[in-house]
Image: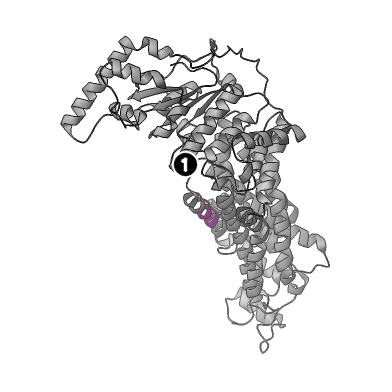
Amino acid sequence: MTVHSGEVLAVLGSKGSGKKALLDVISRRVQGPVRGQILLNNQPMTVCLFQQRCGYVTHKCDLIEGLTVEQTLYYTPTRLTGYLKKSKVKQVMADLALSQVSNRSSKTLASHKTSEFVERDNNSRKTAVVLLLDEPTWDLNPLNTYLVVSILSNAAKKYGSAVILTMEKPRSDVFPFLDRVLYLCLGDTVYAGGTRQMLEYFDAIEFPCPQLENPLMYYLCLSTVDRRSRERFLESNHQIAELVEKFKIEGGGYRKGTTIGPTPPEYKIPLLLGKIGSCGVAWTVYMRLLAATLSFKKSGLKQFGLRLFLVPLYFAILWLFYNRMGLFQHTFASRSGLILNSLAGVYFLGVLNTVVLYPTYRTRYFQESQEGLYGGTIFLITYNLLSIPFSFISCLGAGAIVYPLVGSFDNLLEYLFFSLILWACYIFAEQQTMATLMIVKDHLLAAIFNIYIICVCLTLSSGILRSIKGLQDWLFYLTYATQSRYAAAFLNRQVFLAGDLSKPLPFDQQHNCTNMNLIESSLLNGITNPYCRYASGQSFLSERYARDPGDNIFNGILDSDLNIGITFAFTLGMIVFNLFLYLVPLPAFVKAKFRE
């Protein structure tokens, strides 16, 4: 197979004929034993050379919601910056007839494949030498199919690029734009050469195309195995085998083809330019994330609202249920419930926000990393730089809503600690879900898996649903490996050692518990008094956390400095673990889920 600069080669064949495998071989992305010798101006094609001087747009090409066509093109890592980059984007949109839709969402364009092709290739400093497109006209109506192929043909001639595209159902109106054609059947070549010489070749081997027939489709049907019956299968299989053998014998002259018009010049392959600086790539990727989040379009408003207002909204609902706790004996159970719901809320909402917002960027990362644009470290750092400030502001607002129920703003440091614990738990759940979504494509499965883990951890180690005092030894030691143990311990100490809970609380307006003998009989001799159970918040914590009578829980399991430090250590550890995880080479079948 040969293709020159300025030409468009169409690879035609039915499903399973080897069209995509051929593109994977050319792009050096092929997996398994299939290989091929690819020469670019008589120089071997390497992975590095292809990534810098060529482009490949796969059939699965996910664009980021919230970005316009112009933003999709602009926020692509290139060496161009500032005015030069804006000018190049304007030129590219004009060449591809996209100027009129520059402010429309890129996801709504029928010809989004063309937009993506430009994003990777024509927006670079030098024009791409070879462009590969897998089914660029898939699921397009006839008019858009005609426009896409004609635009690609014009771009190939203008920039001197060799365009290779696959098509499963070629239409007759795209025939003039195809300079060469390659017919494949089960990996074998039925014909390869110029489209105009194709008719001459098939006439010579006594397979002429009937009048008023689409030559492209007619010979595609001729190259396809007919599976409607056993007899047709055997007959078509035998016929295709004959066509393959005839082309091997008689197709040598047609394989080289002839070029209509002047002979194209032989371009020298430019020296490798080296990769773009990591800082420049990271800044471009970060600005793209920010533009998608701050967009005034529907998807942008959704992202902004979920990141900033979902957690405060949840805590506002909690406030409606807990704002009348009062200072009675039942406040101990109510405050425990508030702590549990606060922790469960930030954990669950961290998972929810991640499974809704993260997969789009995750899939885009897997596709762009295959092109050599950037790696997992840059992706995670830029995503965290976007997500973490939003979550911090969100958790500060959430803490401000419920903290007055258990404390006072007179001590702002205590409020800050309360909000920081919520923030650390939110980030931990977010990072844990991001790690899961690296290998799990289904959003629902990832959410169920992470919520299940969180429920188990909260049940065993929070000291709320089940007291630490009542845990078996092996379960107690397992709680050391959970973040919820330390976060819940910090909040329990902060809430139940407040000044309002330092003295006995009445059961209600009619039953007073100021008599300490009543409380002591309730605690030490069984619940003989149904009204007075806890003398103070300290006695409540001792009942929940003290495993032995002599335990000094306030310098041990309830130590504030230790608990807040380990809570953030879990969060930081999960962030570092994710950075390491995205550096580890994944099996091909895992990455293929997000690319194909």
Q: How many marks?
A: 1
Q: Counting other residues with Cα less than 10 Å from the Cα at mark 1, is it few (<14), some (14-19), or many (20 or more)?
A: few
Secondary element at image label 1: helix
Which residue is painted at 40% across and 14% down in the image?
A: 255
Which residue is painted at 56% across and 24% down in the image?
A: 157
Which colour assignment does the render follow? one colour
Q: In which quarter of the view is residue 499 placed?
A: bottom right
Residue 569 vs residue 41, the one in the foreground: 41
Residue 587 vs residue 452, the one in the foreground: 587
Whether residue 109 is visible:
yes
Residue 548 rendering spot, x and y as whole percentages: 62, 60
Residue 433 rendering spot, x and y as whole percentages: 56, 48
Whether residue 559 is visible:
no
Q: In which quarter of the view is residue 309 placed?
A: bottom right
Residue 104 rendering spot, x and y as whole percentages: 61, 48
Q: Which residue is mark 1?
A: 143
Q: Which residues are magenta?
A: 450-456
Q: Is residue 536 above or below residue 145?
A: below
Q: Is residue 455 magenta?
A: yes
**Amino acid type for the residue under numbered disc 1:** Leu
Residue 455 rendering spot, x and y as whole percentages: 53, 57
